[in-house]
């Protein structure tokens, strides 16, 4: 006798009420479940609801009594009796009252069709192994208040039925909206839901097995492993355990690791299932990492979820003795630590090993999301390792030294500052490796400061504005840098007091990297001036803003700035730090906003960096971004909105205090400031200077060139001395468009602003390749050999009729332009660049490792001497039409269309260059 519950009876009535013909007795073969409601209502065809009473009996007499009692009950409507009494034993008077005059056998399939509004069911639902499904669908039907089952209007397929059932049974019904299929992401989320796995465990064995098998078909081999874990009460660990399963991913797990993993997952999981499960979990983690890469509450929640799961995975790996086997896992925090440990060893092996080890660190999937600062610090150590491996720097003059400091040694200072702060989470071996690199680089830098002091002494005695030698003096920065800009558009002169070359390097990299600003230059390099002596604010800043050697405060600076620009036929106004902010809700004072919107030259002094030397923390001066300089983002945005170029300049640099806690001020005579004094006898680490460049103490001072000396109580940093970091004044010229460049000026590509050792790709020299007949290349006819340095008519390098003793060498770009495919492609491009332009750009990208800024690509094209589009974006657009054959991305714009990428392998493949020509 089948067991019938309230849901089945309700479904049966829904299908039968239209055929009652006024009768109020329904006999159903089966037994009503104990504890079910004895009275309830069901919807009728006319929109009303009919009151139903239900009872169970096993005898003919019981049927008669139940019917008589029903008739005697006031307000009674429909009586349902479940029974096993045979139909032939029922009296005629009862038969006359019964719906259809017979005992109804429950057809669960008919009920399911009615519940889903389907015309028929998938035939498989009437056969093994799916015979359990109709009853399960009836039992799982959502309440009427929730809308019941989704209406089909056609055949109810097995997959549709299972999606509906799994959604309700597992509590993930929203997953299948729009006909979506189940995936492991949803199941993993469900496994972590409180009570989710318990819902599966509460089902009958047949239903549990059926759901598991269907999910395995729909979601893959990973589903059974996950469901087994859920049924074991380990749903909260399921994602973390998937990371451990990666030891089986390559099929190379050791016997010990396989046994350990088996003990974690228990019996029943095949290696293929574990590999599938590991892949599925890694896919989920990868998507989480993508979510965590943004900003806002959702990204923060994703980051916390990643941390929780992977910390749990590390704990599970440790308890299962799988940490060693998972040492190279790209998700585990312990795997990240293992990669850093390898980097610590590689730093002592050489720059190439260190670079490879760092790349392995950066490839860890958590590197950019959870450990960006640690990865960047590791990169700084590798950069310094490359610099230490380069030849000893040379110093020939003061001018050459400050230019080299802005272009090269200041970048060393930037890396040194970060390494000095260090990695608070680093293991001892890594911390020691960083310290070793730091100390070696700092020792070399100290030698440069000592050499600079030796050059500075004689130079200071004779250097004047009229005879600066090969040096840009700080009083000439406005004349040489700002005045040419004013002929195009009056600039905004931003003086970041105390900005060193290290900070300038970071700010310039950030500003030009975003693509909103182009850096301009007059001599193919960033401008670098030398400060006055001593290199203190009261002298150097006034000298900078007045355009002449002078000492004074804000009033002197304001008057001198206006007077200087008046000589050059421009009105000018200078705002100091306290005059920049506006009232509440207004980041910049209205007067400053109006000045920037005018045609006047505007100067602004910002003291954030200088003030940090006195009141900041050591770590705060190791890493500067634009947003950390108070008011700088707003001022830059305002200038950009008005189409103004910006001169970002310092008045002097600074040195950081990296002495030990026990080190105090140096006792000396004539102390006037932290880094200069009046005594004439120089001690070790000091230099005595005299001459027209010295604007204190009648032209004679003693200043330290060593960063370790200070005469006053300890601070975070100091200025006033003769170290390169103090005496060098960087000047960056930024413009919203390169079209604002004065005549003879050009855009400074980002790659040209940074030293060659900064990025590993930039250190590789172009490698010429021997000329061979590339597949598809046109056969050259014998022609007179061109003169040395001369190109043939089509700018391709011709192969001589008689090969020379040593083969000529063609670059990758030259190989491409000789191919038949390229010449054919060129016919379909309107006004293509000359051959040498295309070849030069390809070679520049190739030598840079495949990626260059738009400015660098433009510079390469201009440097080729050929005719080209003046707009970098236009040039790249033409190159894509020339080189991107059949839609394959050989050349593309990346990083918000600010950089150009060349896929070298795709280029060679599309133009059919043979392996021998590589």
Image: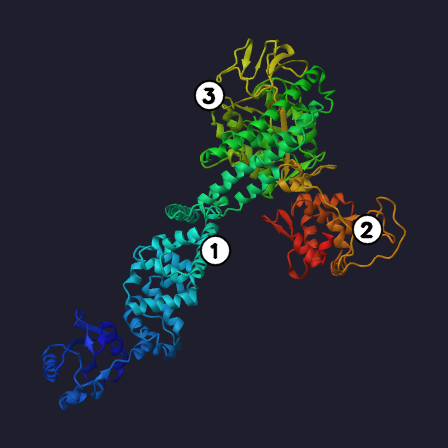
Q: Is residue 49 visible?
A: no
Kindly identify which numbered label has been placed on residue 727. none
Tag 3, which secondary structure?
A: loop
Residue with the mark numbered 3: 661
Q: Position of residue 156 (x, y in %)?
A: 38, 75
- Image depth: mark 2 or mark 1 in front: 1
Task: Tell me the CA gap for discs 3 and 1.
Answer: 51 Å
Residue with the mark numbered 2: 797
Question: Is the residue marked by circle 3 packed among few (<14), some (14-19), or many (20+) residues within 10 Å?
Answer: few
Q: Farthest residue in the front direction?
A: 255
Query: Residue 829: which quarter of the image?
Result: bottom right
Image quarter of the N terminus = bottom left
Q: Is residue 667 visible?
A: yes
Residue with the mark numbered 1: 249
Name above or below for residue 154 compared with residue 613.
below
Answer with mark 2 or mark 3, whichever residue precedes in sequence. Answer: 3
Task: Tell me the CA gap for discs 2 and 1.
Answer: 50 Å
Q: Position of residue 659 (x, y in %)?
A: 51, 22
Task: Tell me the CA gap for discs 2 and 3.
Answer: 65 Å
């Amino acid at each position: 006798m089948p067991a019938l519950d309230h849901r089945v009876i309700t479904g049966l009535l829904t299908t039968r009420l239209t055929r009652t013909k006024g009768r109020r007795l329904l006999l159903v073969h089966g037994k009503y479940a104990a504890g079910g409601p004895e009275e309830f209502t069901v919807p009728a065809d006319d929109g009303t609801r009919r009151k139903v009473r239900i009872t169970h009996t096993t005898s003919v007499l019981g049927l008669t009594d139940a019917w008589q009692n029903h008739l005697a009950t006031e307000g009674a409507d429909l009586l349902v009796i479940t029974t096993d009494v045979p139909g032939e034993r029922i009296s005629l008077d009862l038969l006359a009252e019964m719906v259809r005059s017979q005992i109804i056998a429950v057809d669960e399939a008919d009920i399911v069709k009615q519940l889903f509004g389907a015309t028929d069911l998938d035939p498989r639902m009437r056969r093994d192994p799916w015979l359990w499904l109709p009853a399960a669908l009836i039992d799982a039907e959502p309440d009427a208040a929730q809308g019941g089952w989704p209406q089909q209007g056609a055949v109810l397929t097995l997959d549709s039925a299972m999606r509906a059932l799994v959604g309700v049974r597992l509590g993930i019904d929203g997953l299948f909206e729009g006909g979506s299929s189940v995936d492991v992401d949803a199941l993993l989320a469900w496994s972590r839901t409180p009570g989710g796995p318990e819902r599966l465990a509460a089902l009958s064995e047949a239903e549990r097995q059926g759901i598991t098998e269907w999910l395995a078909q729909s979601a893959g081999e990973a589903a059974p492993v996950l469901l087994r874990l859920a049924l074991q009460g380990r749903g909260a660990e399921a994602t973390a355990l998937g990371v451990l399963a990666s030891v089986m991913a390559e099929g190379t797990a050791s016997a010990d690791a396989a046994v350990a993993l088996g003990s974690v997952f228990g019996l029943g999981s095949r290696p293929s299932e574990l590999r599938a499960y590991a892949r599925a979990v890694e896919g989920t983690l990868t998507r989480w990492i993508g979510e965590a890469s943004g900003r806002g509450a959702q990204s923060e929640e994703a980051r916390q979820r990643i941390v929780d799961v992977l910390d749990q995975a590390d704990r599970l790996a440790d308890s299962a003795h799988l940490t060693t086997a998972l040492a190279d896992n790209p998700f585990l925090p312990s795997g990240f630590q293992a990669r850093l440990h390898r980097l610590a060893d590689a730093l002592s092996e050489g720059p190439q090993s260190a670079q490879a080890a760092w790349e392995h660190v950066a490839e860890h999937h958590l590197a950019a999301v959870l450990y960006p600062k640690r990865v960047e610090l590791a990169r700084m150590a590798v950069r310094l390792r490359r610099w230490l491996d380069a030849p000893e720097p040379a110093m020939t003059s003061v001018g050459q030294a400050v230019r080299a400091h802005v272009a090269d040694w200041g970048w060393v200072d930037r890396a040194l500052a970060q390494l000095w702060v260090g990695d608070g989470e680093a293991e001892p071996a890594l911390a020691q490796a960083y310290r070793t690199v730091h100390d070696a680089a700092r020792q070399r830098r100290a030698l440069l400061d000592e050499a600079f002091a030796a050059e500075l002494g004689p130079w200071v005695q004779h250097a004047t504005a009229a005879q600066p030698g090969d040096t840009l003096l700080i009083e000439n920065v406005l004349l040489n840098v700002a005045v040419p800009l004013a002929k195009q558009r009056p600039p905004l002169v931003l003086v970041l007091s105390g900005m060193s070359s290290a900070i300038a390097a970071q700010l310039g990299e950030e500003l030009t990297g975003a693509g909103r600003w182009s850096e301009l230059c007059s001599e193919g390099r960033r401008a670098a001036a030398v400060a006055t002596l001593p290199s203190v604010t009261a002298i150097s800043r006034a000298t900078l803003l007045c355009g002449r050697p002078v000492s004074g405060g804000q009033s002197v600076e304001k008057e001198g700035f206006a007077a200087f620009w008046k000589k050059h036929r421009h009105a000018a106004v200078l705002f100091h730090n306290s005059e920049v902010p506006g009232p509440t809700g207004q980041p910049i004072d209205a007067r400053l906003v109006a000045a920037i919107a005018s045609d006047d030259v505007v100067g602004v002094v910002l003291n954030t960096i200088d003030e940090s030397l006195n009141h900041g923390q050591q770590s705060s001066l190791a890493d500067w971004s634009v947003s950390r300089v108070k008011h700088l983002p707003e001022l830059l945005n305002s200038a950009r909105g008005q189409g103004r170029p910006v001169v970002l300049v310092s008045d002097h640099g600074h040195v950081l205090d990296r002495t030990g806690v026990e080190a105090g001020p140096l006792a000396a005579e004539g102390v006037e400031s932290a880094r200069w004094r009046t005594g004439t006898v120089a001690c070790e680490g000091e230099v005595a200077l005299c001459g027209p460049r010295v604007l204190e103490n009648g032209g004679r001072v003693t200043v330290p060139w060593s960063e370790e000396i200070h005469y006053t109580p300890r601070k975070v940093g100091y200025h006033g001395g003769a170290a390169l970091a103090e005496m060098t004044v960087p000047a960056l010229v930024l413009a919203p468009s390169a079209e604002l460049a004065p005549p003879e000026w050009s855009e400074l590509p980002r790659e040209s602003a940074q030293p060659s050792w900064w990025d590993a790709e930039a250190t590789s020299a172009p490698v010429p390749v021997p000329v061979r007949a590339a597949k598809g290349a046109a056969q050259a006819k014998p022609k007179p050999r061109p003169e040395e340095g001369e190109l043939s008519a089509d700018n391709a390098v011709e192969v001589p009729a008689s090969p020379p003793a040593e083969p000529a060498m063609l670059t990758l770009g030259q190989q491409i332009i000789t191919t038949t495919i390229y010449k054919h492609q060129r016919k379909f491009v309107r006004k293509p660049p000359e051959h040498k332009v295309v070849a030069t750009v390809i070679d520049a990208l190739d030598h840079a490792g495949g990626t260059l800024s738009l400015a660098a690509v433009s510079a390469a094209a201009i440097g080729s001497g050929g005719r080209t589009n003046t707009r970098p974006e236009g040039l790249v657009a033409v190159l894509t039409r020339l080189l991107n054959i059949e839609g394959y991305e050989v050349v593309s714009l990346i990083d918000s269309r600010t950089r150009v990428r060349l896929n070298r392998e795709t280029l060679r493949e599309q133009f059919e260059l043979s392996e021998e020509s590589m």
